[in-house]
Image (cartoon, rainbow, N blue to C red):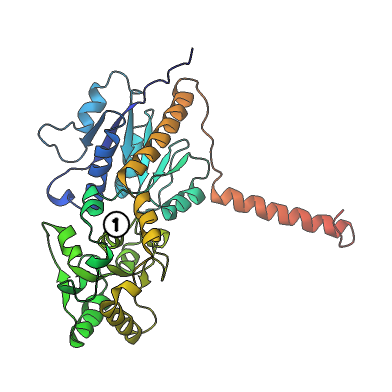
Amino acid sequence: MAIEPAPLRYLRFLVPGTTGRFRCGGLQVELQTAQLTAGLVPTELVTYRQREPGRPFLADLLRGEPSPGEALWIVSWGFDVPQLLRRLKGRPVAYHAHSSGYGFDLPPGVPVLAVSKNTLGYWGDRAPRNPLFLVPNALEPQWLQRGARQPDQVAAGSRPIDVLVQERKSSAYVLDRLAPALRGRGLRVEVQRGWVEDLVELCNGSTVVLYDSADYWRGRGVSEGFGLPPLEALACGCVVFSSLNHALADSLDPSLLGHQIGCGTLEADLERIEAAVADPAAWLPQPARLKALLETCSEPVLRRRWQRALTAIDAHWNRILLDQALALRSLPVWRLRLDQVRGRLKRWLLRRRNGGRLP
């Protein structure tokens, strides 16, 4: 008789709050991910800074939880991760890693659920003995269902906006130099500020989308964790000109799926964007290539990735909590460098003893 696998631990996604100053792209991704995993295992959202009606609060759960091993806690809020991991010590926990570069190290055994290959590589270097998984962010279904990307929907002149810029995260170069210069050449440029009720419709009405977040993230010292806006624009049949920093390089293969912005000179940008507005079909990715990219970001594909990752993480914590297995540790950098210096010194001494030759 086949042995039925043990049910997965239920999930608790930790967020500081869901309203007011906590509303941002990172929160939206966590909310969407929690909805996605709810189709696999019972999932709840837990706040830890702001108490909210009808929602569990971390401090209350930690005081009243009789069996600390029943849930898998998901932490994600970069600067809060170290103190959250200390509060959750002894409990199954995983780090849903978006941006990288916060500077902290993870305790041995804490799994990482990286949203991009860029972030995966960061933790593959910084925590090579921790369990690592790749679970990209999913495009919300509306982008795939309503995105206007059929050939007859992207013809030149068929959309009311030639060039769309989202002000948030955009560089001074795009806002103060490139956008005015494009207007000076007669293009219809829209700079989107504030809240938009229907962002899909806005992108469906735009021929070219500019996204330049390199300066934004460099100024903050952390990385672009995933980069949804260019993918959302591609799903709507827009020609995308983007920076290629951090996780943006995961998907935006230059000249095949997107195009580099700030490419050497202002004149080069102006010429290429004008050409894309005049003939978008020549600048859009091949349909098969775009379809493959968007499929990897669909919720059904991501749900399967989460299923595999959560199954492996559950088994990992069972080994540690039930079987008392010891989590592997990564050697600190100072120790690795000291060992390398010792190795070089040892080889030098051997050469000295053997007349300049190694035995």
Q: Quadrant of residue 81?
A: top left
Q: Quadrant of residue 96?
A: top left
Residue at the spot 39% in from the left edge and 28% down from the top edge: 90
Toward the front, the furthest residue is 152
Residue at the spot 24% in from the left edge and 24% down from the top edge: 63
Residue 65 percent coordinates (x, y): 26, 22
Apparent side of residue 243 relative to residue 145 in the rendered image (left or right)? right
Depicted 296 relative to depicted 69: above or below: below
Q: Secondary structure at mark 1?
A: helix
Residue 245 percent coordinates (x, y): 38, 65
Residue 255 percent coordinates (x, y): 41, 71
Residue at the spot 48% in from the left edge and 37% down from the top edge: 108
> Is residue 247 among what the camera can see?
no
Query: Which residue is under mark 1?
Result: 228
Apparent side of residue 155 relative to residue 251 in the rendered image (left or right)? left
Depicted 121 relative to depicted 248: above or below: above
- Label 1 is placed on what type of residue? Leu
Viewer-proximal residue among 355 and 99: 99
Q: Within 10 Å of the Cα at label 1, are there few (<14), some (14-19), or many (20+) other Cα atoms? A: some
Depicted 257 relative to depicted 182: above or below: above
Residue at the spot 43% in from the left edge and 55% down from the top edge: 118
Count of numbered badges drawn on the protein: 1
> Is residue 72 among what the camera can see?
yes
Viewer-proximal residue among 78 and 258: 258
Viewer-proximal residue among 244 and 150: 150
Residue 129 percent coordinates (x, y): 53, 41
Toward the top, the furthest residue is 1
Q: Quadrant of residue 275?
A: bottom left
